[in-house]
Every structure is written in structure tokens, then in C-alpha cells.
Amino acid sequence: MFRLLCFLVIVSVASSANIFAIFSVPSISHQLAFQPIWQELSLRGHKVTVVTPNPLKDPTLTNLTEIDVSYVYRSASLQFLLDNPNLLPDQVMSMISKYYIKPVIESQLNDSVVTEILNDKNSHFDLVISEMICSPAYAFAYKFNVPLVGMMSLPDVTTASMAVGNPLHPVLVPETLLGYGRILSFWQRIVSTYSQIRYVLRYVFISLFL
């Protein structure tokens, strides 16, 4: 009986997972932070399917399937920020959401391979891993009814934190683009709170629905 129990424990510990990962941001600086994660997971025996604009293309990673969406680089541009240098921080964030993040997500969701996975009723994954700043990961986790592991390669943003039930207090964690330090004056607290409210409203009612 003891030997059987030990065997079952070993088998349980050694079992591999089927993981779906999506790292959407078309920027090599973002991708470099996450490439070692899906590489190491595949090396440890997990079956990993990853959507990325910068695939490793390493034939030795036999457990890794990369969905190459590098074409999003052609349509993703932040030129509008250079054309509008006087935008307020919340306007910058909402414009990035509308004119950069939203087109990237839509492009990747319309990818033929991604669409095939979504439409396949037999598709099964044990876990979804994603960068949270620019990703439809919540939908994938809901679709496959599995846990979601979110990651960030830059300071947290309000909308990402709200999505996982961990809203940021505007006085304690002001938006990065405001350039405030750790200790805020009374006026800076007002500006930070006002900026966060404007950003969330613009994000929800403009960026997502237009």
C-alpha cells in the first residue's frame, strides 16, 4: 500500500500540463521578458501553445507550438502619440487602448489558427498564461474554464488591476504617466484621482465600444 501511494504521488508530481499562452504586445522588449517562460515550460515537459509576434522558432523545443502573429507589427503604430504631444495622461492611455491595443487584439483573434482553436469543441487546456496589458486572456480562460496567470513587464495599469479584482488606489499608486513620486501633495492626489476616473470611463465607454 505504501509503495502504491508513493507511486501515485510521483506520477502526480511528474504530470505535465497543456498550457495556452498569449503574449500580444508587438514589441521585442516585451517579448524578451516572457520568451524564457514558455521556453522553460516546454523544456520541463509541459505542452505549450503560445500566440506571439516574436516566436523563438527553435526546432529543439518539441513540446512548443508557436502561433506566429508577427504581421501585427505592420498595423501596430504609436505614431498618433507623436502627432498629439499635448495629450493628458488619461487621454494617452485611452488612445493607446483604442488605436493600438484594440487593433492588435482583434487581429490576433482573427488569426486562422487562433480561430480554429476557439471553434474546436475538443480544445482543452489546463492553464492560460498571458501578459495582461494587451491581451484577450480573460476570454480564453473563460472559454477553457481554467485558471489564468497574468504577468506584466512594466508598472501595473489601472484597467489590468481592476480586471483581476485588485483596483489601484489613485493616491497610493498614481498612474505612471503622471510622473508623480511616492509621496503626493494634496493637489496631486486630486489630480491622480480625477485622472484615474477619466481614464477608466474613457477606456470602458470609448476604447472598448467604438
Image (cartoon, rainbow, N blue to C red):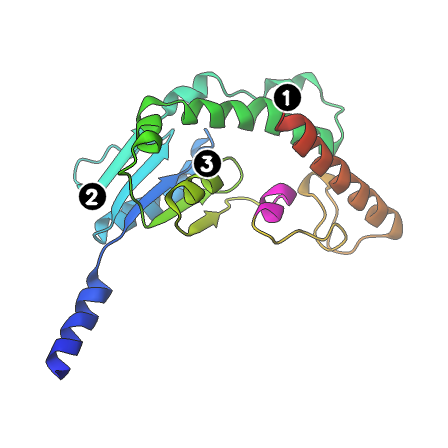
**Would you say residue 186 is visible in this rendering?**
yes
Q: Quadrant of the N terminus?
A: bottom left
Residue at image coords 40%, 22%: 110
Q: Which residue does the image show at 17% across and 71% down from the upper left?
A: 8
Secondary structure of the residue carrying tag 3 is helix
Question: Local crowd at mark 1 within 10 Å, few (<14), some, or many (≥20)?
Answer: few
Q: Do the CB atoms of the residues marked 1 and 2 lie less than 8 Å apart?
A: no
Q: Position of residue 191 (x, y in %)?
A: 83, 42
Which amino acid, mark 3?
Answer: Ser
Q: In this rendering, which labeled residue sits more in front, label 1 or label 2?
A: 1
Query: Which secondary structure, mark 1?
Result: loop
- For the point 54% across and 28% down, which residue is it? 101
21 on left or right of 197: left
The residue labelled by disc 3 is 29
**Which residue is denoted by mark 2 in the rendering?**
63
Percent of width and height locating residue 67? 31, 30
Provide residue 167's location: percent of width, then percent of height. Answer: 66, 51
Mark 1 vs mark 3: in front: 1
Label pair 2/3, CB-CB below 8 angstroms: no
Of pointers 2 and 3, the one earlier in the residue sequence: 3
Magenta part, dominant SS: helix
Along the line of sight, the residue nearer the viewer: 126 or 30: 126
Residue 200 highlighted magenta (yes or no): no
Q: Which residues are magenta?
A: 156-163
Q: Specify few, some or many for label 3: CA neighbours under 10 Å numbering under 14, 14-19, or 20 or more.
A: few
The numbered mark at residue 83 is: none
Q: Which residue is mark 1?
A: 210
Nearest the eye: 27 or 1:
1
